[in-house]
Image: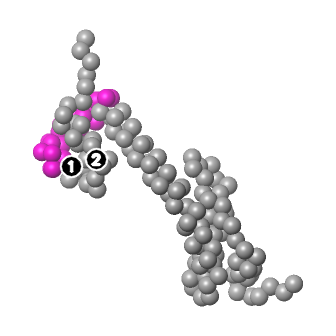
Amino acid sequence: MKEKKLSPKQKLFLADFTGGNYSVFDLLERHKIRRSDYRRWLGEMLFVDEMNARIESSRQNSQIRLAQSAPAAAEKLAKLAESDGETGRKACLDILKLSVQDGEDKTIAAPTVEISDEQAEKILEFMAGGQAIDD
């Protein structure tokens, strides 16, 4: 029995599917693929498995890029938390959100945000409703 392989048209479609910023409908039009053919492809395990593998690979690549940029983003957040006004308040909220997310089960963990005593004091002050905290 002959082993089934992806057609050249399927390969081109899948390459653009994960490599470009096109919707499925844009890709069908771009590659002159009828919707009925696409629906038939979705019934073929080989095509679906390849599509799922490419989606998962794309997702993992995105997580890696996020993980690589997370330390710099966390450092910027910590510096912004020292700001007065709305910017500092929003940075404090984002740091708190990161702290909560850190305990969740994820493939790639969120970065731990290192904050100074001054930054922690600002966060606590914000959490207390803007009131200064007395010793």
* Residue bearing the label numbered 1: 27
Q: Nearer the viewer, residue 72 or 27?
A: 72
Residue 17: assigned label: 2
Instruction: State whether residue 92 appears in this view.
Output: yes
Could you tell which of marks 2 and 1 lies nearer the N-terminus? Answer: 2
In the rendered image, residue 92 lying in the magenta stretch gets the answer no
Q: Specify whether 45 is left or right of 109.
A: left
Q: Is residue 93 visible?
A: no
Q: Main secondary structure of the magenta part?
A: helix
Q: Is residue 125 above or below residue 95?
A: below
Q: Amino acid at mark 1?
A: Leu
Query: Do the numbered discs 2 and 1 sit on residues whose CB atoms are within 8 Å?
Result: yes
**SS for callout 1:** helix
The outermost residue toward the right is 135
Mark 2 residue type: Phe
Q: Position of residue 99 (x, y in %)?
A: 67, 63
Q: Indicate the position of residue 34 as horizontal and vertical percent values.
A: 14, 42
Which residue is drawn at the image coordinates 69% and 67% (left, top)? Answer: 114
Which residues are drawn in magenta?
27-46
- Quote the CA–CA distance across marks 2 and 1: 7 Å
Q: From the viewer's perspective, is residue 88 above or below residue 101?
A: below
- Residue at the spot 80% in from the left edge and 85% down from the top edge: 133
User: Which corner quadrant holds the N terminus?
Assistant: top left
Element marked by disc 2? helix
* Residue depicted at x 62% and y 88%: 84
